[in-house]
Amino acid sequence: FMEFKDSYQAGSISEKAVLAYLQKKHPDAYIQKGYCKEYDIHIPSINIYIEVKQDFQSQYTGNTLVENSFNGCPSGISTSGSDWFVFVTRCNFYVITLEALKSLVKEDNIINKSFIGKGDKDPKTAYLVPREDLINKCFKVIPVI
């Protein structure tokens, strides 16, 4: 597991990879500068907001981590103002609407787990979404080249 600084830098690389993919069709897409808990990427020409989440551990756990609180305060899926989520793994971009993701985590078989992440001092809660369930709800799965 990575420390926060390393995790942040890796997340930034994932955001840039998703941006490069998006800019092929939407050259006006950009990464929001500074801290913004509502979204990471905006495409002004179609007014779409995207949240990018890197989850390389999912290849080992079989679950995609979907954060919903940090230190007792809503975060992640609970505070997102995005239209789409893109989960980045080593092999794929998993593209899902926020609506479909929220619907998915409400299903009975989705575990909501509390833990303290490596490098964190405070607890977070996150849904552990089985990868196959995520794939079944995805709008698109894009192989990483």
Image (cartoon, rainbow, N blue to C red):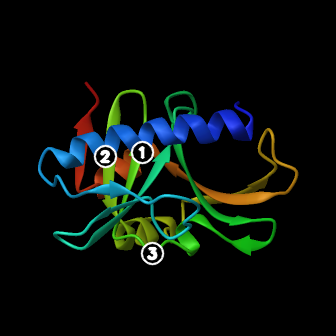
Badge 2 vs badge 1, beta-carbon distance below 8 Å: yes
User: In terms of secondary structure, where does tag 1 sit?
Assistant: helix
Please state which of the two labelled residues, at mark 1 or mark 3, is closer to the viewer: 1
User: In terms of secondary structure, where does tag 2 sit?
Assistant: helix
User: What residue type is disc 1 on?
Assistant: Glu
The numbered mark, 2 or 3, whose residue comes first in the sequence reads: 2
Count of all numbered marks drawn on residues in the image: 3
Determine which of the numbered discs, if any, sits on residue 81 in the image.
3
The numbered mark, 1 or 3, whose residue comes first in the sequence reads: 1
Badge 1 vs badge 3, beta-carbon distance below 8 Å: no
Residue located farthest toward the right when viewing the structure as drawn: 121
In-front residue for pair 95/52: 52
The image quarter in which residue 101 lies = bottom left
What residue is shown at x 57% (from left), y 74% (from top)? 78
- The image shows residue 72 at horizontal and vertical percentages of 80, 71
Q: How crowded is mark 3: few (under 14 residues within 10 Å), some or many (20 or more)?
A: some
Whether residue 117 is situated above or below residue 80 in the rendered picture: above
- The image shows residue 142 at horizontal and vertical percentages of 24, 39
Residue located farthest toward the top when viewing the structure as drawn: 145
Q: Is residue 126 left or right of residue 18?
A: right
- The image shows residue 38 at horizontal and vertical percentages of 50, 70
Tell me, yes or no, if residue 88 can be seen here: no
User: What residue type is disc 2 on?
Assistant: Leu
Tell me, yes or no, if residue 66 can be seen here: yes
User: In terms of secondary structure, where does tag 3 sit?
Assistant: loop
Alpha carbon separation for disc pair 2 and 1: 6 Å
Instruction: Read off the residue under disc 1.
Output: 15
Instruction: Read off the residue under disc 2.
Output: 19
Image quarter (top left, top right, bottom left or bottom right) of the C terminus = top left
